[in-house]
Amino acid sequence: MLLDLNMPQMDGFSVLRAIRENPTTSTLPVVILSTSRERADVQQSYAQGANAYVVKPLEYDHFRRTISSVMEFWTGQNQVNR
């Protein structure tokens, strides 16, 4: 799952906490995708169980390449524990 920290109804930390507390989704891989480079946001994301933290580029082509790289890793290179 790609999860932004800044959302209108519920912030990403609350969503991440709910994912990790639910036995059905607790092992779901979660990649934080945020414009924030704040050290506190990165640390809190990992402390709450994020599997990765990626800074979202603002320029479209760079954003597209970043998303492609993240997806390639998680769907092609990462070995799933089954």
Image: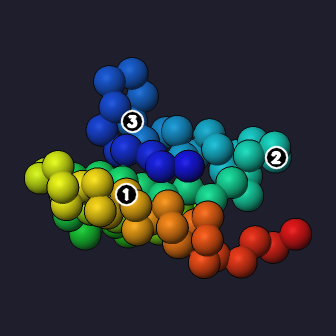
Assess disc 3: are there few (<14), some (14-19) or many (≥20) residues with their C-alpha within 10 Å of its C-alpha: few
Residue 14 seen in the current view: yes
Assess disc 2: are there few (<14), some (14-19) or many (≥20) residues with their C-alpha within 10 Å of its C-alpha: few
Q: Which amino acid does label 3 sit on?
A: Asp
Locate residue 36: give its quadrant. Answer: bottom left
Horizontal and vertical percent for residue 66?
Answer: 31, 63
For the residues bearing labels 3 and 2, Cβ distance under 8 angstroms: no
Assess disc 1: are there few (<14), some (14-19) or many (≥20) residues with their C-alpha within 10 Å of its C-alpha: some
Query: In this figure, which residue is indicated by the disc labeled 2?
Result: 23
Question: Left or right: where does residue 44 sit relative to residue 62?
Answer: right
For image coordinates 11% across by 53% down, the residue present is: 59
Residue 44 seen in the current view: no
Judging from the image, what secondary structure is the residue with disc 2 in?
A: loop
> Is residue 71 positioned above or below 58 on the image?
below
Query: In this figure, which residue is indicated by the disc labeled 1?
Result: 67
Query: In this figure, which residue is indicated by the disc labeled 3?
Result: 11
Judging from the image, what secondary structure is the residue with disc 3 in?
A: loop
Split into 4 quadrants, where in the image is the C terminus? bottom right
- Residue sitting at the far right: 82
- Pick the residue in front: 45 or 73: 73
For image coordinates 74% across by 46% down, the residue present is: 25
Q: Counting residues from the N terminus, which is met first, the one under dot 3 or under dot 2? A: 3
Q: Counting residues from the N terminus, which is met first, the one under dot 2 or under dot 1? A: 2
Q: What residue type is labelled 2?
A: Pro
- CA–CA distance in space, label 1 to label 3: 21 Å
Q: Which amino acid does label 1 sit on?
A: Ile
For image coordinates 25% across by 69% down, the residue present is: 39
